[in-house]
Image: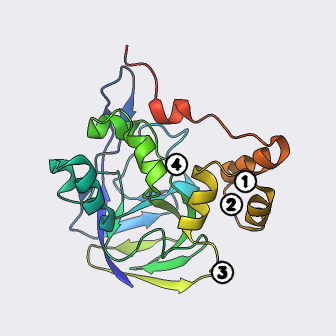
Amino acid sequence: MSTVVLLTGTVRPCTRPGSRSGIAKTPRGDKVWISPIGLEGDEQGDLRVHGGPDKAVHHYAFDHYAAWRDELGALPLLETPGAFGENISTHGLTEAEVCLGDRYALGGALLEVSQNRQPCWKLNDRFGVADMARRVQDSGRSGWYYRVLRPGLAQAGDALRLTERPHPDWSLHRLGILLFRRVLDPAQLEPALTLPLVPSHRKLVEHRLRLCAVEDWEKRLAGPPRS
């Protein structure tokens, strides 16, 4: 059980022409309605790749901030939650402790862990670090998403309480290694197909098994040209 900080943000222009993002989040002190598409008052800049039922709520462990400060220095962005665009921030809960399909009660809402986050280039611009998205992915400190099984009200300080764990052998750390270290071993990939993977991750695993090749992530990690 972990207590939470809840965060939301509105869409703002990015540094690259024509791009917009809701990655900048700030803490909420009031009660927030959590619906099947996320926290009330939260926005996403590109609904083709962000938001939606399988990415309704983004969780990032504040536990990781110390490691990022060690790596990047004492950036003001890393002093408080919200640097990574998260809607939920906690202490004591990381990818090593969370499993795919875990269900958590938060206030009146019920959340289900749906997938590891696949970081994108907007982290590069937010941190002013050219390869920040790649660093987040390679570190395994990527965060994760929830789908909302039961809408409800929640507020800062509420407990995030585990209610069900159907896949205890599949921590997000294990799944992240499979996905992000570009594993091609069928003995490791095939068991993942028994999991409730989101369509994009299932397609990824099936593609690797069929073609024995990994996907190209350069566009997601580096983003469009700056000019």
Q: Residue at x 32, y 30 (%)?
A: 14
x, y percent for residue 128: 27, 35
Residue 166 image label: 3
Q: Which type of secondary structure does the marked residue at label 2 adopt?
A: loop
Which residue is tagged 1?
202
x, y (%) of residue 24? 28, 46
Say few, some or many: other residues with alpha carbon within 10 Å of mark 3 (under 14 / 14 to 19 / 20 or more).
few
Of the image marks 1 and 2, the number of the one nearer the N terminus: 2
Q: Secondary structure at mark 1?
A: helix
Dot 3 falls on a residue whose secondary structure is loop
* Whether label 1 touches label 4, CB < 8 Å: no
Label 3 to label 1: alpha-carbon separation:
18 Å
| Image-quadrant location for residue 63 | bottom left
* Other-residue count near label 1 (Cα within 10 Å), few / some / many at <14 / 14–19 / ≥20: some
Q: Is 189 or 54 nearer to us in this picture?
A: 189
Give the left or right position of residue 139, taking residue 155 as reference: right
Choose the circle earlier in sequence order: 2 or 4.
Answer: 4
Image quadrant holding the N terminus, namely bottom left
**Crowding at mark 4 (Cα within 10 Å: few <14, some 14-19, many 20+):** some
Q: Which mark identifies residue 118? A: 4
Mark 2 — residue?
Answer: 197
Look at the numbered discs 1 and 2 and tell me whether their residues touch, using CB distance below 8 Å: yes
Position of residue 121 relative to residue 38, above or below, is: above
